[in-house]
Image (spheres, coloured by chain):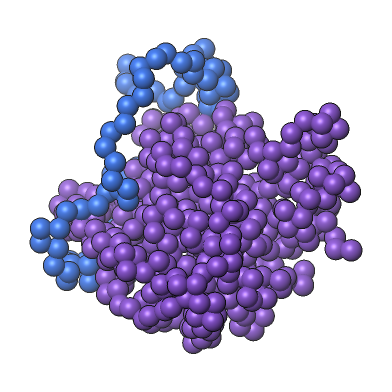
Chain colours: A blue, B purple
Amino acid sequence: MPRLSIEEVEHVAWLARLRLSEAEKQRLTGDLNTILAHFERLQQLDTTGVEGTSHAVPMSNRYRDDEPRPSLPREEFLREAPDARDAFFVVPRIVET
Amino acid sequence: MSQLYELSARELRERIDRGEVSCQEVAEAHLRRCEAVDPHVCAFVTLTPEVALAQARRWDEARARGEPMPPLAGIPVALKDNFCTRGIRTTCSSKILGDWRPPYDATATELIHAAGGVLVGKTNLDEFAMGSSTENSGLFITHNPWNLDRVPGGSSGGSAAAVAARMVPLATGSDTGGSIRQPAALCGVVGLKPTYGRVSRYGLVAFASSLDQIGPFARDVADTALLLNTLARHDPRDNTSVPVETPDYLAALTGDIRGLRIGAPREYFAQGVDETVKAAVYAALDVFRDLGAKYEEISTPYAEYALPCYYIIAPAEASSNLARYDGVRYGLRSRHEADVISMFEWTRDEGFGREVKQRIMLGTYALSAGYYEAWYGKALQVRTLVKREMEQALEKYDVLVTPTGPSVAFPIGEKTDDPMAMKLQDVCTIPVSMAGTCAISVPCGFQDGLPIGLQIIGRPFEEATLLRVAHAYEQATEWHKRGPAI
């Protein structure tokens, strides 16, 4: 496996919406390469034809009855918002006018 | 006479039932103990004395009226601070949640309240449960009650330390890769990770959803069974909660393990496990043999691949779960908010600590285009091999016995620089998490005054067997009777 470059770290940080300082980028590049080098042995295992396990307990979809139930009051959620007005969460402008 | 805070939950309950002590006196004794020792241990993020006293008085009144007293009535309990508590700050020990007050209770919180548990407070953890020492808490470090210069383990370090330091007889934790069992071992208490699906995760702040599971801490096996009796319930609000019957775990403690077949997988005794730890676990195997069980050394060669496998899967799930922290709906919002994208990025920069950022990066990378198959896809396949191997071992043996971790509690600061050093703490606990089955850690010895943990692994949904085996061991040994000097 090729080593992760600092440009790739920047790209992954962008995907994850993480703003990283220069020092953090440097350190994370080193840390991630150390970790991935340690995990390289996963690649040596032959897993041909092995199905992946995404859940510990085999389960299919379960459905509940489609009955209306009350949800928690909107005000209780809006009370925790950093900025809220009327029935809305307020965020910085998204669209230029 | 022993101090009230030294008693087990069952002993407290007997005294309450006999009218020798009130629930209020029990609550006050534990709150005073917290005031006396928590400034040194730092187990609690939030203490809730008003809640505790109000709940205690309510059960005293119920008793005076002759009403039935549920199993935990008047018993002080601490919750790990990733359990939602309605109206009570829930931080996950992360700055990004700020002073968030959940508008609802986790199912586990509700069940404990309904069973009469008295909430003493919320305990410290590695931020979002990511870590093995509680040093990754975004708030402060918790100290091991046996030696304040050492870590309590993690991520449920606050709960383990609170129980060990006699601040509460019972506490809850969550275990994704060892976060109940490893701190239980390092603090010399009992900690049980139930089978995935046994306890509802509704209202447990998500870290890695295919692995997270809630479980109890206590100072002996019977108290652990008592709390599991309350927690283990099918819950329609968690679709991964499995509708299986809950036995009475206290009734499982028969003391009889004659004929029990034990497998001791040799891979768990390699990989940098301290000699003293190995010796303590081998000595425990002899105790089991003397009690009428049989043990054999076995080999589980895939177990050593569980750790890298876990550290791909858990961060991948975490990177997705933690995408919700964006400064819009709750918790922290950065003041840098020129536009919405930079507001997200600044909020996550200011709110998340170093380990959480590292895991989000690792997980996002493992899921990103071009690397998905090589890392995430591969890890899911290896998980199948690890799980299958454990299932096969548990077909032949009733339980597997291993060390809980490679060493006793290590000094604060010792493993924080190398990104792999801390992760290797989880080498013995992670295979169980990958298989989704249950395991318990019980004290099995000491090295330089620090506790050693014994891990017993059971078949899926056979927590009763684990508790029976652990209890038989406990009855034959004295380790659980020791407490830290604090």
- Whether residue A60 is visible, yes or no, is yes
Q: Residue at x 54, y 60 (%)?
A: B467
In the rendering, at what x and y percent does residue B318 appear?
Answer: 38, 48
Which part of the image, by quadrant, shows the N terminus of chain B? bottom right
In the rendering, at what x and y percent does residue B453 appear?
Answer: 55, 72
Q: Residue B295: which quarter of the image?
A: bottom left
In the rendering, at what x and y percent does residue B245 appear?
Answer: 46, 42
* Closer to us: B221 or B94: B221
How many discs appear? 0
Q: Residue at x 56, y 48 (%)?
A: B248
Q: Residue B436: which quarter of the image?
A: bottom left
Q: Is residue B397 left or right of residue B367?
A: right
**Vertical side of B140 occupied by A83: above or below:** above
* Closer to us: A77 or B31: B31
* Closer to us: B450 or B218: B218
- Whether residue B84 is visible, yes or no, is no
* Closer to us: B119 or B129: B119
**Vertical side of B8 occupied by B319: above or below:** above
In the rendering, at what x and y percent does residue A88 appear?
Answer: 46, 17
Which part of the image, by quadrant, shows the C terminus of chain B? bottom right
Q: Residue at x 33, y 78 (%)?
A: B298
Q: Which residue, as the protein is rendered here, is positioned at the far left?
A: A48
Q: Residue at x 48, y 56 (%)?
A: B463
**Vertical side of B424 occupied by B440: above or below:** above
